[in-house]
Amino acid sequence: MQAEMEPISSILRIFEDGKGYGDPYEFSATVRWVTPKKVEILGVLRAPKLSEWKAIRRCLLSYGVEEILINKAKDGKMESHIYKIR
């Protein structure tokens, strides 16, 4: 008999260099695992800065993620964007 656990969601936080869990963070978002290689980023209050986007990409690549899905509401309509990062 075997049990497996699949991660469904994660919290992504970006810290200044030298800081980590428990310290104040610069950016946060919820990550929903769509597949082992595709995630959706949601719950974002502002767009990440370029340096933050690079940190997000590095982090997700280290988990084997190849695609990021971002849905956003604009003018009362939902827009979907898929970013291939690998």
Image (tube, rainbow, N blue to C red):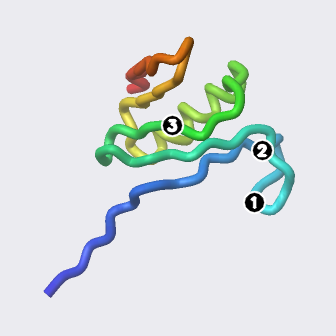
Residue 44: percent from the left, percent from the top?
Answer: 64, 35
Nearer-the-camera pick, 29 or 53: 29
Crowding at mark 1 (Cα within 10 Å: few <14, some 14-19, many 20+): few
Q: On residue 15, which mark appears? A: 2
Q: On residue 41, which mark appears? A: 3
Residue 26: percent from the left, percent from the top?
Answer: 80, 39
Query: Farthest residue in the front direction?
Result: 76
Give SS at disc 1: loop
Q: Give, as a three-letter code, the residue at label 2.
A: Phe
Give SS at disc 3: strand
Residue positioned 44% across, 17% down in the render: 79
Q: Give, as a three-letter code, the residue at label 3.
A: Ile
Query: Farthest residue in the bottom direction?
Result: 1
What is the spatial separation of the Cα atoms under label 1 and label 2, in whole angstroms? Answer: 8 Å
Q: Is residue 72 left or right of residue 64?
A: right
Query: Farthest residue in the top direction?
Result: 75
- Badge 1 is on which residue? 21
Residue 58: percent from the left, percent from the top?
Answer: 55, 35
Residue contact between numbered discs 3 and 1, judged by CB atoms under 8 Å: no
Crowding at mark 3 (Cα within 10 Å: few <14, some 14-19, many 20+): many
Residue positioned 39% across, 48% down in the render: 33
Decide which of tag 3 and tag 2 comes sooner along the chain. 2
Q: Is residue 38 left or right of residue 18?
A: left
Q: Is residue 25 left or right of residue 5?
A: right
